Image: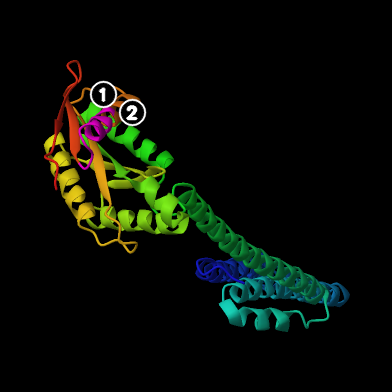
């Protein structure tokens, strides 16, 4: 396993190292050898031949030859080591073909070969461990994504009503609190509509809870079909539903509620019994609610006003201090 960015760098290192080795051989071997040959040839040999001491001359020549051989041998050793190191660097920077070239260097029988064999074993171990780490990281990443998906599903289930599939009271309260905070910051209107089915208890008692649940699911489909995507439709509990209307004034909320009231009143439920609904509407800034509880209390009061007025109506509290409700005309 070789890092892509490291390959060109290792090749450049190998070439620079080779140049330095050649320079070292020239400076430590070739130049001194040339200087020595020049001194001996021009200064020492003429003096010895003039003296006529043949023994000293042969000894000096032998010493010069041995020195030259030693310098040549030292230069060869430097060159061989430098070449080997340069080959190693070049092979390490050659990607997939580098392993074969490193193996070729490891076939040498000297210390370099032994060193390269150890290095090859170490490199193989590192590559194996890197592969294992990558495989483990991949499994860990997959497990983490699965866990995230599970958490999202659990979170979604914790906010959903089992019978209707709508959001539950907990999620509705959270979103209402967020909208009130947005209203306080940007002065954008928001409304809630409480819906309570009229006579639903009789359907449950006469036809059973299965039919009652089917009726609740029909109501949920009506609300979802006639609500915008940014609105929050929830089953608040029992046969009571709550709808959060974002960026909607009280007038718009009244129109929405009255439209839903008419749709429910004319819907052909499978059990054949007529179902109607009463609605309570509350809004900010009209109801001047400081908290979620205040706004919900205003909507709840309006809902009970609609119930007291004869059911199947939409009501809102125009002036809470006077307790004068507004309601839509009752349909026949």
Q: Which residues are magenta?
A: 301-312
Front one among 248 and 308 = 308
- Give the position of the N terminus as an image quadrant: bottom right
Residue drawn at the location 64% of the way across and 68% of the way down: 135
Q: Is residue 308 above or below residue 137?
A: above
Q: Secondary structure at mark 1?
A: loop
Residue drawn at the location 86% of the way across and 74% of the way down: 59
Question: Which residue position holds label 2?
Answer: 292
Question: Which residue position holds label 1?
Answer: 289
**Looking at the picture, how far across and down is residue 99, in whole percent?**
66, 79
Front one among 228 and 32 = 228
Image color mode? rainbow
- In the picture, the disc for residue 25 is none
Q: Is residue 244 above or below residue 271?
A: above
Say left or right for 275 vs 100. left
Front one among 297 and 125 = 297
Main secondary structure type of the part rendered in magenta? helix
Say left or right for 294 vs 83. left
Residue 188 seen in render: no
Is 310 within the magenta?
A: yes
**Looking at the picture, how far across and down is residue 279, in whole percent?**
24, 39
């Amino acid at each position: 396993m070789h890092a892509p960015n490291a390959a060109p760098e290792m090749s450049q290192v190998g070439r620079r190292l080779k140049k330095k080795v050649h320079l070292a051989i020239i400076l430590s071997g070739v130049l001194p050898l040339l200087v020595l040959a020049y001194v001996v040839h021009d200064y020492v040999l003429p003096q010895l031949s003039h003296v006529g001491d043949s023994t000293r001359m042969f000894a000096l020549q032998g010493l010069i030859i041995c020195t030259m051989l030693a310098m040549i041998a030292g230069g060869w050793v430097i060159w061989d080591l430098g070449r080997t190191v340069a080959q190693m660097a070049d092979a390490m920077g050659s990607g997939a073909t580098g392993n074969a070239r490193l193996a070729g260097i490891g076939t040498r029988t000297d210390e370099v070969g032994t060193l390269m064999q150890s290095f090859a074993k170490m490199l193989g171990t590192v590559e194996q461990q890197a592969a294992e780490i990558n495989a483990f990281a991949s499994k860990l990443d997959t497990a983490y994504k699965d866990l995230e998906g599970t958490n999202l599903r659990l979170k979604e289930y914790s906010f959903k009503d089992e019978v209707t599939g709508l959001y539950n009271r907990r999620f509705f309260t959270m979103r209402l609190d967020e909208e009130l905070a947005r209203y306080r910051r940007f002065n954008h209107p928001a409304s809630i509509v409480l819906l309570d089915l009229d006579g639903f208890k009789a359907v449950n008692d006469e036809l059973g809870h299965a039919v009652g649940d089917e009726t609740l699911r029909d109501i949920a489909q009506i609300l979802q079909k006639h609500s915008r995507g940014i609105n929050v439709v929830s089953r608040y509990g029992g046969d009571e539903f709550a709808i959060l209307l974002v960026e909607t004034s009280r007038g718009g909320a009244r129109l929405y509620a009255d439209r839903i009231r008419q749709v429910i009143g004319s819907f052909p439920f499978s059990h054949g019994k007529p179902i109607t609904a009463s609605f309570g509407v509350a809004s900010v800034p009209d109801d001047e609610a400081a908290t979620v509880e205040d706004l919900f209390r205003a909507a709840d009061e309006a809902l009970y006003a609609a119930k007291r007025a004869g059911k199947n109506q939409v009501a809102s509290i125009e002036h809470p201090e006077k307790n004068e409700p507004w309601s839509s005309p009752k349909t026949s």
